[in-house]
Structure formats: C-alpha cells, structure tokens
Image (cartoon, rainbow, N blue to C red):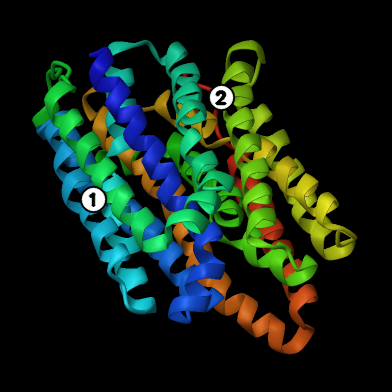
Amino acid sequence: MRAGLTFLIIAYCLSQFFRAFLAVLAPVLRGELGTTTEDLSTASGLWFAAFALMQLPVGWALDTLGPRRTAASLFLLGAAGGCVVFATAQGPGGIILAMGLIGMGCAPILMSTYYIFARNFSAAVFGTLAGITVGVSSLGNLLSAAPLAWVVSELGWRETLWLAAGFTLLIGLGIFAFVRDPAKPEGEAHGSFVELLRIRALWPIYVGMFVCYAPSAGIRGLWISPYVSDIFGATLQQVGFATLAMGLAMVAGNILYGVADRLMPSRKWSIVAGNLAVAALLLTFYLLPPASFAIAVAMFVAIGTFGASYPAVMAHGREFLPHHLTGRGVSLLNLFGMGGAGVMQFASGPTYAGLRETLGSEAAYGALLAILSAAILLGLAAYVFSKERPA
C-alpha cells in the first residue's frame, strides 16, 4: 500500500502542477497563440469545473469499483491525453479543451487517497494525514512556478508539455500496478448522494468548502501573474519567483492547518480565523494597494498561508460522513471545494474585463480582489453555524 500511496501522492503533485501552471505560461501563450487573460480564466475555470463535476461519478466509482481502477483509468485518459492536446494546441480553444481534459483526469486522485485514509485510519487522524498529503503534494505547485519558467525558457512550452504527458503516463501506470483497494464495508449498495444531502450538519460545511479554497487557488493558478505583470512590469523570472513564493506559502499553510488540527481545541474556529485574515488581505489590495512588487508578493504569500484551509474543512466534513458512504462523501465535499474555485475562475475573467473598462487596470484588480473578500465573508457567515463534531 505504501507504494500505491506514493504514486497517488506524486499524481496529486501533478494535479497541483496542472491547476497552477497557467500563471507562468500566460505570457508565453499570449505571445505565441494570442490568448487573453479572459481566455486563460476560462481555461482555468474549466479545469476546476471539470474536476468538480467529475466528483459525483468519482464518488460512485470509489465506493463501487475502488480507487485503483478509478484513479488509474481517468488519470491515464484525461490527464495524459489532455497534456497531448495542450502540446499540440494552435489557439485558445485547444488550451481550453486541454485544461478541461486534464481537470477530468486529475479529479479522482486526491479523493482516492482520502478514501484509503478514511477506510484505514480513524477520523481523528484523517485531518493530519489530509493536511500532510496536500502539503507534500504542493511540491507540484512549486514546480509550476520558477522551475517551470526555467524549463519553458530552455526547451519551449510545447516540449515541456510533451515531457509532462510522458511523466503523467508513467505515474498512471504506477497507480494501476501498485494501488490496493481497501475492503468494502456492509451497506455499500444502499447509500446515495441524496442521503448525504439530507445530513443538515453538512450544509454549512459545504458552504465553507465552496468559498475557502477558491481565492488562494484562483490567485495562485492565474491572477498573480497578470497582476504583477500589469502593475509592476514583472518579467517571466519575476512571475516565477512570485508564484514560487506563494506556492511555498500554501505548502506551509497546509502543514500548519494540519498541526493546528491536532493541537488547537477548535478546528472550526481555526478555519474561521484563517479565512478572516485572507478576506482582510484581499480587501487591502482595494483599499491600500501595495506600492511595490515586494509588498505585493508578501501579501500574496500571506494569502497563500492563511488560505490553505482546504484539508481542514475537508476533515471537518469527514466527521459527519456515514462509513459506507466515504467515497461519495469526500467526493461531494470536494465538488463544493473545486466547484467554488471553478465558479470564481469563470466569473473572474469577465468581471475583471468589465471593471477594467470603467476603473482602469490597477483599480480593476483591487476591485476584483475586494469582491473575493466579500464572497469569503458571506461564506463564513454560514460556516460559523456548523457543528464542531457529531453529537
């Protein structure tokens, strides 16, 4: 099982890489294919939307077929195939299609890992393992920053995507060969997503999942690049540095939330406090825009750190899942998390375009981030009514 989990974690590194690498590729794709910021926000949004929508069939497949076949088949067909489509793209449409395929392929990876954890470990340990997994897998987030910028400058972006396709293929084959499915408990055939939606204790947690991951994922995955490029004239290397710094902060944040999950008396209020800090930082971009590249990066680093509450909210929801619906349950929670990021990315492109026409480029970025701040605050207003744990 250790070898299987290793391949799943490497696959999730690639998932983190794919969801964030447009931020570095944006200047190159703009120059060679004529892609706009709106095109890339659509492509990024489609990655998250495809990822989110696949959670329903993935949840069923995990409970029915098991993680080995579910993860391996989708990763090989979707992620590796999407890389090939990306490498051969001739315009924005090809990039958008490729990102959708890659999102579908990456959809089962983390849930397969969480499924194995949930079946083999206690709920008390799940939060720590979830945080560590996301933290370690965030190496992919880091590789999609400065290292990717260097590889693209040396080899070219198409050659880089061909390399990614080959590596993705190898990891998918490793998942098929080494992952072992946990034994199924009784009652598997009688549960459904409807049963999960009837659990009222999960409703505010779904809202928390929807809003807590979206801002940091969207900013790191796309918006940090045009912000520092348009406002401060950042070069490709500086974009790589900024994305790397925020990626490192997200790694640290995932680990810190995992530690807090074990040490703090309240998981819920740790999540609330962290996301209030993110909302305040986003609002600061509007009220008091950073005066330099360094200050802006420092603020993005803080957002990455405090905004890494995804595994903590997931662990909170895990407490309320029936054992025989583990696969469907973690997938449904993930649907809300990735769905929130997808909605944000789809909406952010046209929202920014409209704001830019009336406010200008710099003020439009600040207003967009202020809207994200308001979304977090609205979501937290519902999440604070969640129960700490089942009665």
Q: How crowded is the residue under tag 2: few (<14 C-alpha within 10 Å), some, or many (20+)?
A: some
Residue sitting at x 60%, y 49% = 216
Q: Position of residue 64 (x, y in %)?
A: 11, 33
Q: Position of residue 187 (x, y in %)?
A: 13, 24
Looking at marks 2 and 1 on the same chain, the residue that comes earlier in the sequence is marked by 1
Q: Position of residue 219 (x, y in %)?
A: 61, 56
Question: Which residue is at the front of the view, 148 or 171?
Answer: 148
Q: Amino acid at mark 1?
A: Ala
Displayed quadrant of residue 227: bottom right
Q: Position of residue 318 (x, y in %)?
A: 40, 27
Q: Amino acid at mark 2?
A: Glu
Residue sitting at x 44%, y 25% = 133
The residue mark sitting in front, 2 or 1, is 1
Q: Is residue 87 visible?
A: yes
Q: CA distance from mark 2 to mark 1?
A: 40 Å
Question: Which residue is at the front of the view, 362 or 10?
Answer: 10
Q: Is residue 258 above or below residue 73?
A: above
Q: Kindly identify which residue carries mark 1.
A: 80
Residue sitting at x 66%, y 14% = 265
Residue 388: numbered disc? 2
Of all residues shown, which one is farthest toward the bottom?
357
Secondary structure state at the residue bearing disc 1: helix
Q: Is residue 178 above or below residue 304?
A: above
Residue 139 lies left or right of residue 98; in this view the side is right
